[in-house]
Image (cartoon, rainbow, N blue to C red):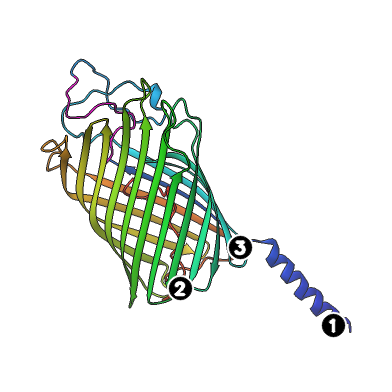
C-alpha cells in the first residue's frame, strides 16, 4: 500500500512539474541593409539639392531629421535597420500565442499579438496589430489586424500566408497606413524543402503640410527557396534566389531600385533549447527604375541584406525540420520579421 502511494505521488508530482513549465520560446533578431531609402526623404533622389549640405540620416523619428542632401544617384552608404523581439507561448495543446515588438525598415515600428489554433493539417490565427509609437509626430499609434494561415500535408506540400492591415485609411495630416502580405507554397523532396514565396510591404504616409502629398515606402520580393536539412543534424542551410525592388514615392515622383538577389541562411542548434541563425543576401545586379533610371548604384558596389537571430526554448523543445521529414517546424511568418529584404 505504501509503495502504491509513493508511485502515485511520484507520477502526480511529475505531471504537475511538467504543467508548471509551459512551452515558451523567446527570440531576438536584427537586420541591416543598404538596399533601402532614407526614412524621411521628402523628394526624389534624381533632384540635386546642392544648397542643402545635411547628410543622409536614418532615424525613426522622422520629424526630428533635416531634409537630406541628394546627389542624383542612389547612395550605397544609406542603411536600413530592423529589429524584432518576440515571445511564443503554448497556452494549451493546439493553441499558442505570439507577442512581437519590432521595427521594420519598410513598415516602421509595430506591436502585434496573435493567437493560433491548429487541427490536423490546418493552422489559423489572428490578432491585433498596432503601429508602433511615433511612426509620425501627429499619429501616436495606428490600429490594425494581423492574420495567418497554414495548410500542409506532412512530407508532401504546404501553403502559408500572413497579412497585416491597418483598419482605417488616411484620415488627416501625417497619418499613415501599414500593409503587408506574404504567401509561400512548397513541396518536400528528399532532404530539402523547395518553395516559392511572394512578399509585399507598404507604408503610406500623408504629408505634414497641406496633406496633399502622399509618401509611400514599398518593398516587393519574389523568391525561390531551397531549405536543405539532414534528419537529426543540428543545422540546416537555406539558399534563395529571386528578385527584389524597393521604392519610395513622393506624390507624382517615384524612386525605385531593383536587384537580382542570391542569398543563404545558416541555422545552428548547439543545444535542443537554443538556435541561432545568420543570413546574408547580395544583389548581383542592381539597377535604378522610374526616376532613378540610369542612376542606380555603381556596378562595383556591394549591395546587401543581412540578418541574424537567437532563439531560446523553455519547457517543451520545439520540433525542427532536422528532426522530421514532415514540415512541422515551418512556422507562420511574422509581418515584421527582421530578415533580409527589409
Which type of secondary structure does the marked residue at label 1 adopt? helix
- Kindly indicate whether the residue at mark 1 contacts the one at mark 3 (C-beta within 8 angstroms): no
Left or right: residue 259 versus residue 190 is left
Q: Residues within 10 Å of mark 1 (few under 14, many from 20)?
A: few
Along the line of sight, the residue nearer the viewer: 143 or 272: 143
Q: Position of residue 71 (x, y in %)?
A: 17, 26
Q: Residue at x 34, y 32 (%)?
A: 39
* Disc with the residue nearer the chain's start (1 vs 2): 1
Classify 326 as above or below 269.
below
* Disc with the residue nearer the chain's start (2 vs 3): 3
> Which label belongs to residue 323?
2
Left or right: residue 34 versus residue 137 is left
Boundaries of the magenta span: 35-49
Which type of secondary structure does the marked residue at label 2 adopt? loop
Q: Position of residue 127 (x, y in %)?
A: 54, 51
Viewport quadrant of the C terminus: top left
Which type of secondary structure does the marked residue at label 3 adopt? loop
Q: CA distance from mark 2 to mark 3?
A: 17 Å
Q: Which residue is mark 1?
A: 3
Q: Residues within 10 Å of mark 2 (few under 14, many from 20)?
A: some
Q: Which residue is mark 3?
A: 315
Q: Main secondary structure of the magenta part?
A: loop
The mark closer to the camera, 3 or 1, is 3
Q: Residue at x 51, y 30 (%)?
A: 140
Amino acid at each position: 500500500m505504501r509503495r502504491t502511494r509513493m508511485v502515485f505521488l511520484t507520477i502526480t508530482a511529475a505531471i504537475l512539474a511538467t504543467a508548471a513549465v509551459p512551452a515558451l520560446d523567446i527570440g531576438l533578431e536584427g537586420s541591416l541593409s543598404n538596399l533601402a531609402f532614407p526614412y524621411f526623404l521628402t523628394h526624389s533622389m534624381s533632384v540635386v539639392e546642392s544648397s542643402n549640405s545635411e547628410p543622409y540620416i536614418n532615424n525613426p523619428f522622422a520629424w526630428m531629421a533635416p531634409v537630406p542632401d541628394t546627389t542624383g544617384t542612389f547612395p550605397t552608404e544609406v542603411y536600413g535597420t530592423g529589429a524584432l523581439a518576440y515571445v511564443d507561448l503554448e497556452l494549451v495543446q493546439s493553441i499558442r500565442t505570439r507577442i512581437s515588438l519590432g521595427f521594420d525598415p519598410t513598415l516602421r515600428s509595430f506591436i502585434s499579438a496573435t493567437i493560433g489554433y491548429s487541427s490536423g493539417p490546418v493552422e489559423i490565427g489572428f490578432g491585433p496589430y498596432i503601429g508602433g509609437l511615433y511612426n509620425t509626430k501627429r499619429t501616436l499609434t495606428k490600429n490594425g489586424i494581423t492574420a495567418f494561415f497554414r495548410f500542409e500535408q506532412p512530407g508532401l506540400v504546404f501553403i502559408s500566408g500572413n497579412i497585416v492591415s491597418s483598419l482605417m485609411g488616411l484620415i488627416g495630416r501625417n497619418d499613415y497606413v501599414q500593409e503587408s502580405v506574404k504567401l509561400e507554397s512548397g513541396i518536400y523532396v528528399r532532404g530539402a524543402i523547395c518553395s516559392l514565396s511572394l512578399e509585399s510591404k507598404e507604408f503610406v504616409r500623408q504629408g505634414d503640410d497641406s496633406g496633399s502629398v502622399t509618401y509611400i515606402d514599398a518593398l516587393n520580393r519574389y523568391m525561390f527557396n531551397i531549405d536543405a536539412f539532414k534528419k537529426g543534424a543540428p543545422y540546416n542551410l537555406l539558399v534563395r534566389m529571386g528578385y527584389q525592388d524597393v521604392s519610395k514615392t513622393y506624390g507624382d515622383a517615384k524612386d525605385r531600385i531593383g536587384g537580382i538577389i542570391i542569398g543563404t541562411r545558416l541555422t545552428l542548434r548547439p543545444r535542443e533549447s537554443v538556435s541561432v541563425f545568420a543570413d546574408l543576401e547580395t544583389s548581383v545586379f542592381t539597377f535604378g527604375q522610374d526616376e532613378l533610371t540610369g542612376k542606380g548604384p555603381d556596378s562595383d558596389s556591394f549591395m546587401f541584406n543581412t540578418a541574424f537571430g537567437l532563439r531560446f526554448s523553455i519547457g517543451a523543445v520545439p520540433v525542427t525540420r532536422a528532426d522530421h521529414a514532415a514540415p512541422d517546424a515551418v512556422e507562420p511568418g511574422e509581418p515584421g520579421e527582421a530578415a533580409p529584404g527589409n
